[in-house]
Image: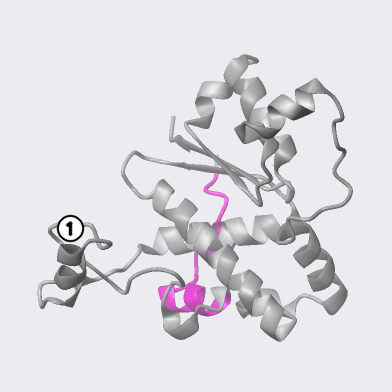
Amino acid sequence: WESGVEEYSGLSLEDVKKALGLPDGQFPCFNSKEDPLGHDPWTPEGLEALKADTALPLNPRWHQYIGVLKMMRCAINGDPVLLMDKVGVGKTMQAVMFIALRVYYREYFTQHGKFPGMFGKFDQQAVKSDAAEIFDLQNPYRPVLKNHRRNVKDSTIYGHTFGAAFFDEIHAARTVSRLFVSFAEVRSSCQAGFMVGMTVTP
């Protein structure tokens, strides 16, 4: 199979940051530095470690930026994604990067009436339509279940609304099973209809 990101293979890291519309090239909602010793950045020790000379710049890899660019493009187009790579190369980081970018895009759209970067080139009607489908969690067209199942469902994960759903180890649900049905039910609760399945390369 192909990588699925062939159209972006010629882009430099700076090109990708510009295409994503990142403010000052920095990924939104992320620390600019990381502690090489792994202190929790939410603790007093971790905060001090990030101020120390030993702190290193937080630099996600090129393929992680490309993955996020592809996921955002698919989210806007309403296409699902299979995020597949070797163990330990940063699939989870890409998922977190996408969520942070999505928050930034929503805030940016509210302020400017368009998406940042390459996505700002979409025509105004498409932007309004996509923003409503992808970012607004109050979709009035979702059917409401009015029975006991609905009451039980409300107190579980299946009663919540998600803007996007990420499924790690998606290969475990490749056949019809309880896990498969669980994923399908969460997928139906996902207002954006955007789903990312994550798995290691076979």
Q: Which element carries disc 1, helix, strand or loop?
A: loop
Q: Position of residue 161 (x, y in %)?
A: 69, 45
Q: Position of residue 155 (x, y in %)?
A: 64, 32
Q: How many marks?
A: 1
Q: What amino acid type should be assigned to the residue bearing mark 1?
A: His
Q: Residue at x 65, y 15 (%)?
A: 176
Whether residue 10 appears in magenta in the rendering, the answer is yes
Question: Which residue of the protein is positioned furthest toward the top in this rendering?
Answer: 177
Q: In this rendering, would 43 be left or right of 193?
A: left
Q: Residue at x 68, y 83 (%)?
A: 111
Residue 59 visible somewhere in the drawing: yes
| Segment colored magenta | 2-19
Whether residue 62 appears in magenta in the rendering, the answer is no
Look at the picture and state if 14 lies above or below 126: below
In which quadrant of the rendered view does residue 110 lie? Answer: bottom right
Q: Residue at x 82, y 77 (%)?
A: 123
Q: In this rendering, would 151 be left or right of 47?
A: right
90 or 109, which lies in front? 109
141 or 119, which lies in front? 141
Look at the picture and state if 88 lies above or below 104: above
Q: In this rendering, would 24 be left or right of 50?
A: right
Look at the picture and state if 29 lies above or below 149: below
In which quadrant of the rendered view does residue 183 lie? Answer: top right
Q: Position of residue 17 (x, y in %)?
A: 48, 76
In which quadrant of the rendered view does residue 6 lie? Answer: bottom right
Q: Which residue is mark 1?
A: 39
152 or 109, which lies in front? 152
Question: Quarter holding the N terminus?
Answer: top right
Residue 115 visible somewhere in the drawing: no
Q: Position of residue 29 (x, y in %)?
A: 44, 69
At label 1, counting other C-alpha atoms closer than 10 Å, the crowd grade (few under 14, some 14-19, many 20 or more) is some
